[in-house]
Image (cartoon, helix red, strand yellow):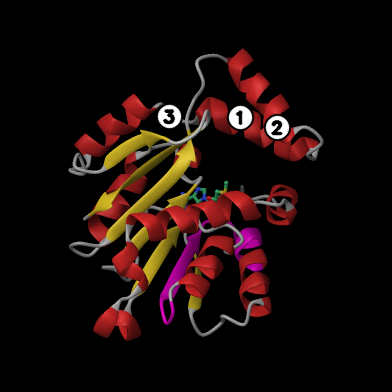
Amino acid sequence: MDGQEQSDAYAFADFAAPNAAFVERFLQLFPAFCCLGKRAESAVAVDLGCGPADIPIRLCRAVPRLRVLGVDASAAMIGHAQRAVRAAGLGERVTLREAYLPAELPGPFDAVVSNSLLHHLPDPSVLWDTIASQAAPGAPILVIDLFRPDSQDAARGIVEEYATGEPEVLRHDFFHSLCAAFTPEEVTGQLAAAGLAHLEVHAISDRHLAVWGTR
Ligand SMILES: C[S@@+](CC[C@H](N)C(=O)[O-])C[C@H]1O[C@@H](n2cnc3c(N)ncnc32)[C@H](O)[C@@H]1O
């Protein structure tokens, strides 16, 4: 998603509901993270493939004093993220870094989140190895992504059901994202290979899977 047109279409699309649901799920799974106690002043989460930074902004609003590093490979997307963070008045708490994973990051982090990055990666181990190396012991981890339907026809059906009326560039991306995504069984294998077999993998809708647990 390094082109300006794709980044613009994504950044201007309305992902408020799924992004709010992502943060709600994180807080439900890890309620103690809301009340970080004496670690609150220094807690830093990382959002891998942060896009326009809506999830970092929502996390900061939900968890007082948390700071978030958003990492994304696309300069255009980081531009959108910078504008969103400024508009939210969170420039002191959300830092953005343009980096193509795998990349050196200033971890370990107190939490690792990632939404809709996995299916973009030619090598999925990049995400899991980054999490394994960047999450501090005990750090909450939440990854949500699409999962691949059984057939291209099923993928077309999902696009029709959930993206009717969306710009063609988004419908095109959605279809190809569904086809590029991994099944829950494949993700389970990827986790085992990365030494993260203890993380849970769940289908949470007809097209999304979630991976969660602690480091
Ligand atoms: C579908 S968007 C999701 C954005 C954001 N997480 C959200 O939920 O709104 C995927 C993002 O992953 C980024 N991305 C893809 N490959 C990447 C890589 N290897 N390293 C870092 N970011 C990457 C893209 O630039 C894009 O912004």
Q: Reply above or below: 133 against 93.
A: above
**Residue 156 % position (x, y):** 66, 20
Whole-number angstrom distance, CA of label 2 to CA of label 3: 18 Å
Judging from the image, what secondary structure is the residue with disc 2 in?
A: helix
Question: Are discs 2 and 1 less than 8 Å apart at CB?
Answer: yes
Residue named by callout 2: 172
Residues shaded magenta: 64-79
Image quarter where the C terminus lies is: bottom left
Say if 44 sits above or below 180 in the image.
below
68 drawn magenta: yes
Residue 104 at least partly seen: no
The residue beneath circle 1 is 176
Q: Earlier in the sequence, mark 3 or mark 1?
A: 1
Reading the image, the residue beneath label 3 is 182
In front: 71, or 114?
114
Amino acid type of the residue tagged 2 in the rendering: His
Amino acid of disc 3 = Phe
Horizontal side, residue 115 vs residue 36: left or right: right
